[in-house]
Amino acid sequence: MIVTGKGGVGKTTVAAAVAQAAVAARRRVLLVEVATPGPLASVLDVPPLAGEPRHVREGLSAVALEESSALEDLVHQMMPLRLLSRRLLSSDTFRIIAAAVPGIIETALLARVIGWLEERDRRGRPLWDLVVLDSPASGHSVPLLATPRTLSGLATVGPLGAIVRKTSCWLSDPARTRALVVAIPEDWAIAEAVELRESLRDGLALPVARPVLNAVFPKRFSRTDETLLEEAEASGSIDPQLLEAGRYFIRRRAVAMEHGRTLRAATRERPLELPFVFSGSMTWEDLAPLAEALDPLLETA
Ligand SMILES: Nc1ncnc2c1ncn2[C@@H]1O[C@H](COP(=O)(O)OP(=O)(O)OP(=O)(O)O)[C@@H](O)[C@H]1O
Ligand SMILES: [Mg+2]
């Protein structure tokens, strides 16, 4: 499950909530942070994530996907002779060249994720039922996910060709992969989510899940409440600050509903609505209502 969307829309939060929903459904989950160790650890309430999967809580492990260890892995896969691959990796020239070859870092990152997906326990069962990728903001995740397609015409033979083909197969297989595009109720986020979903599905042949509308203000006032509020305003029998707070809540809810309709009309799919969480800092416990709202996603994943 690849969680993506514009910067700041809640990708990390949603990735953690997907993991929580899957753990509750008794799946063994690996949560992957693409980047140097970042905010995922604070949501999980654990020390910064490392380059190797670490057990975090019952059913859940987490890992930071690092460029250097991914590149090492890729070289080892391409050069089975450890002595040669180690020598190559220790050379500064190689690192400079590798960083300059378009797509090589991206291939290395994706190959490492697929390596985790293919890991087996002693009884031959997959180690993880679900790998959730907290991928970078759309501007960076599209080039990352496009790499197997871009390279498939160039790297056709040899070990690199095989790795690129395998990555392509994983990414385009609806039985194994889903891209989850997250938006919030803001014009720019909705427009970006619609565009991103189209470019992932139509441009990259990536299977996409229902869109996610995050941080939706809950319905707190009924129609009757709204009328009472208006009457109280007319008669001046309400504290102006309370009136403003009530109006703000109603407005935010109405705007979110409107954005939900726009997203639905543009994608022809009913968005999964995740509630706004009123909490100073998002904790694992705070994610529960989000995980619950994401549950339908797991039935089809
Ligand atoms: N449903 C929600 N309710 C309230 N706050 C939320 C919700 N989802 C996310 N947030 C908050 O919004 C902020 C951004 O969320 P998050 O870090 O998950 O976004 P992101 O898309 O991963 O950002 P980046 O692009 O920087 O990686 C955080 O402070 C997070 O706690
Ligand atoms: Mg993030």
Image (cartoon, helix red, strand yellow):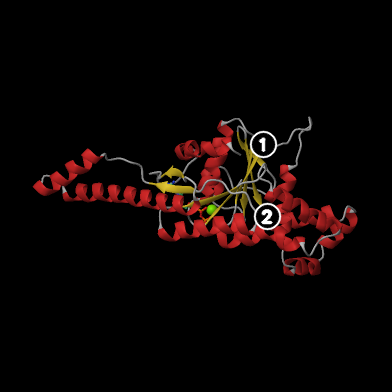
Q: Quadrant of the N terminus?
A: top right
* Residue 197 visible, this angle: yes
Q: In the shown orientation, is residue 261 left or right of residue 155?
A: left
Residue drawn at x 79%, y 67% is 92
Residue drawn at x 32%, y 49% is 254
Q: Nearer the viewer, residue 88 or 190?
A: 190
Q: In the shown orientation, is residue 12 left or right of residue 160?
A: left
Mark toward the start of the polypeptide (2 vs 1): 2
The crowd level at tag 1 (other Cα within 10 Å; few <14, some 14-19, many 20+) is some
Residue drawn at x 49%, y 60% is 192
**Residue type indicated by callout 1:** Asp
The CA span between labels 2 and 1 is: 22 Å
The quarter of the picture where residue 131 lies is top right
Disc 2 element: loop
The quarter of the picture where residue 58 lies is top right
Q: Is mark 2 within 8 Å of ligand 2?
A: no
Q: Position of residue 257 (x, y in %)?
A: 37, 48
Q: Quadrant of the C terminus?
A: top right
Q: In the shown orientation, is residue 203 left or right of residue 257?
A: right
Q: Nearer the viewer, residue 11 or 68?
A: 11
Residue that carries the numbered disc 1 in the rendered image: 129
**Residue type indicated by callout 2:** Glu
Residue drawn at x 80%, y 62% is 155
Disc 1 element: loop
Q: Which mark is residue 66?
A: 2
* Residue 45 visible, this angle: no
Frontmost of labels 2 and 1 is 1
Q: Position of residue 212 (x, y in %)?
A: 49, 47
Q: Which mark is residue 68?
A: none
